[in-house]
Each structure stands twice: as C-alpha cells, then as structure tokens.
Amino acid sequence: MTQAQLEGPMVPRVGVTIDIHHRDLPIALIGTAGGALALWANAPAQIAIPVAGLIVLDIRVRRWRRRT
C-alpha cells in the first residue's frame, strides 16, 4: 500500500505553531520590575518567575489546518 492509500483522500492536516517574541521595552521593564518586586517580597520563585516571563514575552499559540 502506498502512503496516499493509508491516509485516504483529502485528509486535513492539523498543526500548532507557537510564536514567542519579546514585548516592547516599557512592558518588558514592567514585567522585570514586577518579578523583582515579587522576589524581594519573599514570594515563591516558582510563581514569581513564570508570571514575570508571561508579562515580558508575547506568546501566541495558533492552530492551523491544511488540506492535502
């Protein structure tokens, strides 16, 4: 059997793209300052660092579907 026979005709292909970019400088400074303030106030690092990262980084998750 060929690959086309196993997949079937016109099977849509689904994928996920994750884009990670730095935000503009003022937002990045706010996120960094917020994370530093949280660590200075004795917040757990397991919470403060990921939250600061989410503020500093622009993360977009996109689903796409393509017909073959």
Image: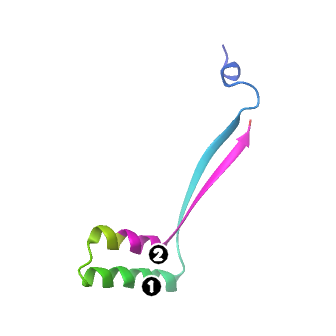
Whole-number angstrom distance, CA of label 2 to CA of label 1: 8 Å
Query: Which label sits on residue 4?
Result: none
Q: Quadrant of residue 52?
A: bottom left
Q: Is residue 23 left or right of residue 39?
A: right
Q: Which residue is drawn at 76% across and 26% down?
A: 9
Bounds of the magenta segment:
50-67
Q: Position of residue 6 (x, y in %)?
A: 66, 20
Q: Residue at x 69, y 45 (%)?
A: 65
Q: Name the residue under label 1.
A: 30
Please report whichever mark, 2 or 1, sits nearer to the chain's N-terminal start: 1
Q: Where is residue 63 in the image (x, y as percent from the top left)?
A: 63, 51
Quarter of the figure with the N terminus: top right
Q: Which residue is drawn at 38% across and 85% down?
A: 33
On whether residue 61 falls in the magenta region, the answer is yes
Q: Position of residue 41 (x, y in %)?
A: 26, 84
The answer to whether mark 2 and mark 1 are in CB contact below 8 A is yes
Q: Position of residue 5 (x, y in %)?
A: 70, 19
Q: Name the residue under label 2.
A: 55
